[in-house]
Amino acid sequence: MRRHFDVLEEKRIGKVKDSDIFKKLVEFAKPYWKIFLFTVFLLLGTTVFELGMPYIMKSAIDRTLMPTARKLTREDELLRSIKLKYPGAFYEDMVVLYKLPRAAKKDLEAGKYLSKTSYFVLPLKKEFTSILKRFKLPYYEKGNLLFVEQHTIYKLPKKELRILRSEHYSLLVKFAFLYLLFLFLDFVFTFLQVYYLQYFGQLVMYDLRMAIFKKIMRLPISYFDKNPTGRIVTRATNDVNAINEMFSAVLVYTIKDFFLLTGILIVMFKLSPTLSWKIILFVPFIIALSFLFQKFARKAYRNVRRKLSKINAFTQESISQIDVVHVFYAMRKMIRRYREINHELYKANIEQMYVYAFFRPLMEMLRVVAVSAVVYFGGKGIFENYVTFGTFVAFLSYIDMFFAPIRDLAEKYNILQSSFAAGERILLLLDENEERRDGDLIPKQIKGKIDFENVWFSYDGERWVLKDITFHVDEGKTVAIVGPTGAGKTSTISLLARFYDHQKGEIKIDDTRIQDYEVGSLRKNTAFVFQDVFIFKGSVRKNIALWDEIDEKEIEEALKLTYAKEFIDRLPNGLDTELGERGITLSMGQRQLLSFARAIVRKPRILVLDEATSNIDTYTEHLIEKALSNLLSNRTSIVIAHRLSTIKNADKILVILDGTLKEEGTHEELLKKDGVYAKLYKIQFELAREA
Ligand code: TTP
Ligand code: MG
């Protein structure tokens, strides 16, 4: 069968709405929503832990490394009200800042109630006071606490300083453990999340592959005329993987990024709204830049895809036709053409690279500027006392965390693009019309009467290949179809078993429209022997029985009837000889005999033969001739015949010229008529005599 490939399939890509593609994919994911939900839950967990870690760091710094108390410089109504509200934070004229909420702290700062000097807070212990006394450092005892001025503490020698700060040290260790705990939990949650996400992805892929393969099996043959094998194979393999990537690398992490970005904003605003507002100014830039990037990346990406598929199609075509290329010695021309396509792909890739080469450093620059902004505004905040040192450090972490997802955006975008393209191609495939199985008539046995009534047929819907064909074959008779190449002989018989559907007229078997039969039963009763015989990888026996269980006796009988026994017996392992890939290769004549056996073993009521015209040695020719007469008896047969003997013995001869039935009759009748057939016969006869 000739294949006309639509090499520019990629042109169609981009016509389906992304939301439709997404909807379809979600359908495949639906049965496993629980697993998906679980991974989202785990993601939420990791988000919390990841957000928590800088916060722990911040607390550790502010509670242990930095001084935490200030002296009150004045007192008034407002201060008294704050004191009343948070009595635990005040020790006479000292205030312990971490015991106050941020709003109260801000009020104190704004009202200038606080001293410039900061104080470390220690529990009141003899050990500490004795050291402080010994080194004559000023300190205050208030309640059960000890307050030491920040700058004086560093006058102590190392040993004493260590003792003095042992309290802070043990607190620091606690924070460190908490940090480690978060780190560990983050690890466990991430592990589980990756595991379950992959599990989910694999389940979806499994189903998707099944759906695609089922679809491929049910597509009409005409689909395969338009789509090269490589492309269809890609659907079930690469494209499915691309979809998995979408689930595992993009979708879920986008959810996580969303959580994380929102979380970062919340925590940042909680820590220091003033500083956050200044940093947030970068967000519109980031968004604008991302949109711009997305626009360019999409275009570049599509272009690369198009060129890639072009080069793939060309490569595939060149290899599958390599013998033709060799015969016509067209290697150089093919290489030249390949060079052009290759160059186009190269250019498209370079263009795409520009987009990324520009975007990535730009984002990186923006990140560094944002970090600098944190250093500048945060530093200023520390001077002006509205930002603690811990907050400053946490901000640095958060700003990095904020940019990380955006930095990966380019990559994710790439994956998303390819998975949507893959999704679209899969969607288009899954939406293809299946071979129509409209009939439900399942006859026990077809008798084999065939009628074509004014049949019109076109492959492409534009050019009629068969025009108004009408003929009748009685049960058990043999009809030969003759005509020049391209006349429409193969097309005529393809319609009979509904490999293709005719557009006008009726085709009937036993007075029933072929559309009314269940296709499977129709095909079970008809056997086809095509011009090119396909040999599957496997034993000779398997090649005859194909997918059916057929007993040994029947195979033996078929081999005898078709005269294939002789050559099969001569094969190294007889019926068990491996054929196909790495097995034995059969000659044309042997293949023909094998395909006869393949047909006859099914005991079809209707046999359709598309005779090969290839040169076969006289002995095999003789075998085929004998086999043919066995094949044709006891059943209705339509034979596209080139062999004079077959034609002469046929009950009826149809002469097809350019899609129309020109003459019809027996050999004698047609000779007498002295028309097209008579002319053809004379030419062949002469040739035969000359040979
Ligand atoms: P065929 O029916 O294949 O012609 P044929 O069998 O009579 O020729 P041959 O003796 O060489 O085997 O083709 C009839 C026309 O239909 C021809 O112009 C090519 C066209 N065609 C398609 O467009 N698509 C197809 O898939 C096939 C098989 C044929
Ligand atoms: Mg043909």
Image (cartoon, rainbow, N blue to C red):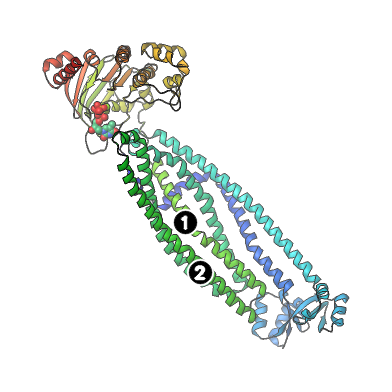
- Within 10 Å of disc 2 (Cα), the crowding (few <14, some 14-19, many 20+) is some
Instruction: Tell me the quarter of the picture where residue 269 sits.
Output: bottom right
Provide residue 196's location: percent of width, then percent of height.
60, 47
Residue 439, above or below 58: above
Say left or right for 638 vs 103: left
Please rate how many residues cluster around mark 1, counting C-alpha atoms within 10 Å: few if below 14, some from 14 to 19, many from 20. Answer: some
Between 311 and 305, the residue placed more toward the observer is 311
Amino acid on which disc 2 is placed: Leu
Q: What residue is rendered at 67% in x and 78% in y?
A: 104
Residue 479, x across and y down, in percent: 24, 18
**Residue assigned mark 2:** 366
**Could you tell me residue 471's position as x and y percent?**
21, 22
- Residue beneath label 1, please? 413
| Residue 353, image quadrant | bottom left
Q: Quadrant of the C terminus?
A: top left
Dot 1 and dot 2 residues touching (CB under 8 Å): no
Query: Mark 1 and mark 2: span between their CA atoms?
Result: 19 Å
